[in-house]
Image (cartoon, rainbow, N blue to C red):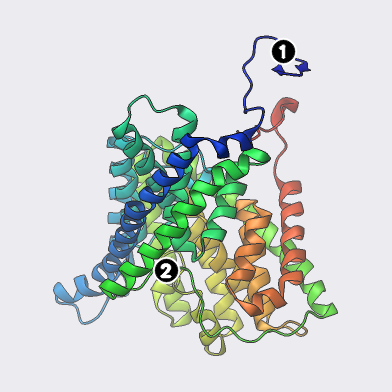
Amino acid sequence: MSVGPSGPVGGAAPTTPRDPLALLRTRGYLKLLVLAALLGLPICAVAFGFLALVHELEPLIFHDLPHALGFDGTPAWWPLPMLAVGGLLVALTVRYLPGNGGHEPADGFAVGAAPAVSALPGIALAALATLSFGAVLGPEAPLIALGGGLAVGAVRLLRRDVPEQTASVVGAAGSFAAVSALLGSPLLGAFLLMEASGLGGALLGVVLVPGLLAAGIGALIFTGLGDWTGLGTYSLTLHHVPEATGPTLPEFGWALVTGVLSALAGFGIRRLARFLKGRVARHRLPATVAMGLVVGALAIAFAEATGEPASELLYSGQSALGSLFSDTAGHSVATLVLLAAGKSLAFCVSLSAFRGGPIFPAMFIGAVGGVALSHLAGLTLTAAFAMGVGAMMVAMLRLPMSSVLMATLLLGRSGLTVMPLVIVAVVTAYVLTARLTSAPRNGVPAQVPA
């Protein structure tokens, strides 16, 4: 197909406007900005409520419930029945409610079209059962789906014949608003969704601006609700980050090592998760319960082997990231290695059967691996932590820009100091991950995101 001066020739309609920036000068775009700002308020309130509910259910299930049943503390075997119940709830939701419980996390991190409103209850219930009962997945993927679905549903409630392009932009703005407050920055949310969706060119700014506006206003609401309720903001923040020194030549060598190890670990996690996913799909209910039992057994084995609580191996690891700096002196290298290995296996199993996102488990596994490497000569703790986070993120998500930004901005000023090391580790992991990934069959090129 040739391209003429007025667009594609041959009867096909152009896929993008001749001048996407001309949309910025229309009254319709101004209305879209107002709509995005208004939607950011309730969507962030819903996201806050969802995270608050997860935060309250976790101690209720693993601490309050055993006490209510007459146990003196939480029994060592408690994760087994709880993960089995969580698996049962997820399986029933996936089988009987619309929407399949949301995106299959074993298929990789993806940002597609906003789900239908009818699918949102199933997505929320599957995510609550996953996150609250201790499976190793994060809340970011369900929040993206819930934010986009609520935004598009609200617009179509007001106007049933809303154009598809408008619905897509509004859905993206809703996803921005929901996930940005969790990541601690609208900028991080923007880069993450931009890179995951494949947006680019002049149209990027057209879609990005409503999302940034919704995320910025929503973040204010998120912070306000945290202060008003006294529950906190649930944002990804680290406190008491050790001061970083300038990168050294040995640390650049360790950056290469970190990138290679992360790529190999990420490849193994994805490969095993997809293998297990095929088995789970054929026997959804019993297999999901069995996967929950495996996660519980891994947590118990870790606790028995190290004397640490089983909860360190459960959950996404988001709230435990900051404690790695303060607790590293009390953890031996063997404990750190067992934690990284056990968390990786539990991550594989959770990806295959449960519903949630891969970002926080990948960050935690990378951080633990980096802290373990920091015991070796020539590598400081802060640099190792940042390199591990960035390299493991890109190995799992294959989003290099977002991985660098997440690993460095998370650490504040110290992160900027070690950014060159993070870039080397991320690029190494990214290239090696691409080499390890199987080529498409029959020479058919991989599908490019729309």
Q: Earlier in the sequence, mark 2 or mark 1?
A: 1
Query: On the picture, is 177 further left or further right than 77?
Result: right
Q: Is residue 355 something one can see in this rendering?
A: no
Q: Which type of secondary structure does the marked residue at label 1 adopt?
A: loop
Which residue in the protein does label 1 denote? 9
The amino acid type of the residue labelled 1 equals: Val
At x 71% / y 68%, what residue is drawn?
Answer: 422
Relative horizontal placement of residue 188, taking residue 54 as reference (left or right): right
In this orientation, which residue lies closer to the viewer: 302 or 189? 189
> Which residue is located at x 73 percent, y 47 percent?
434
* Element on which disc 2 rests: helix
Camera-side residue of 447 and 268:
447
Q: Quadrant of residue 368?
A: bottom right
| Residue 98, percent from left and from top | 31, 34
Circle 2: residue type = Ala
Callout 2 touching callout 1 (CB < 8 Å): no
The N terminus lies in which quarter of the figure? top right
- Which of the 4 quarters of the picture holds residue 123? top left
Q: Quadrant of the C terminus?
A: top right
Closer to the camera: disc 2 or disc 1? 1
Q: Which mark is residue 299?
A: 2
User: Foreground residue, 349 or 124?
Assistant: 124
